[in-house]
Image (cartoon, grey):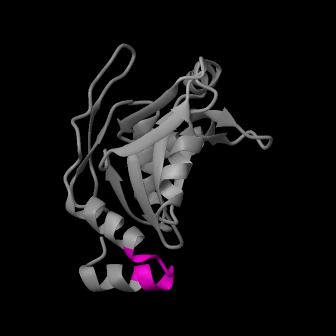
Amino acid sequence: MMNSQEFGNWCKSLNLSQSASEVIRQIRAEKPSRRVQGGRGNVSGFYPSRKMGVTISFESHRHELARIYELEHNPDVLEYYDQPLAIELCYQSLSGRNNRHLYTPDFFIISNNSAFWEECKSEQELVKLSAASPNRYQQDENGIWRCPPGENYAQKFGLEFRVWSSALICWIFQQNFI
């Protein structure tokens, strides 16, 4: 993890705005904003992160834990935070109603060249969610999943919001790691 001087230097190197630096500083200082919950078909748990020096919580043994393994061993990832502070999503529902609610992404990730919120979902779940809520989850022409309301929120700070699909899991890496 970066100390405060390294963090300041990293912010300067990316030319981050004061508001972006402040929101990242707040995420770095806070504990996870909520406890993970197991659900039908999910196995939640905790991963002891050497990179972060804390345990990282996950709600999905297959998807989020797989992503944690990748974040933990990716040299480009400097820090990652589970269940960061909730963000506000605003979008129009399928019926045309305006939705506005607080939402907790799975991770906030700081890499050498960027910082972003990230939501991890199974490919099957994303297909269902995009049909039920096409203004919240969409797949672009390159097959990349997006969350426009999350992107709009992140854009206020000059940051990003990404959707990470289970289709991106490198199972050979996972098997070798385990």
Q: Is residue 95 left or right of residue 38?
A: right
Q: Quadrant of residue 54?
A: bottom left
Asked whether 30 falls inside the magenta stretch, the response is no
Quadrant for the C terminus in the image? top left
For this rendering, which residue is in front, 111 or 28?
28
Q: As displayed, is residue 54 above or below residue 77? A: above
Q: Position of residue 148 (x, y in %)?
A: 59, 43
The residue at the point 39 percent across, 30 percent down is 60
Q: Is residue 9 left or right of residue 171?
A: left
In this view of the protein, can residue 170 be seen by the observer? no
Q: Residue furthest top?
A: 40
For this rendering, which residue is in front, 137 or 177?
137
For this rendering, which residue is in front, 9 or 26?
26
Q: Is residue 156 left or right of residue 57?
A: right
Q: Position of residue 80 (x, y in %)?
A: 37, 57
Q: Position of residue 79 (x, y in %)?
A: 37, 63
Q: Residue furthest front?
A: 97
Part of the protein shown in magenta? 10-18
Q: As displayed, is residue 47 above or below residue 111? A: above
Quadrant for the N terminus in the image? bottom left
In this view of the protein, can residue 1 be seen by the observer? yes
The residue at the point 52 percent across, 67 percent down is 114
The residue at the point 38 percent across, 76 percent down is 18
Q: Is residue 23 left or right of residue 16?
A: left
Q: Quadrant of residue 91?
A: top right
Q: As displayed, is residue 87 above or below residue 10? A: above
The residue at the point 53 percent across, 59 percent down is 155
Q: Position of residue 28 (x, y in %)?
A: 27, 63
Q: Quadrant of residue 110?
A: bottom left
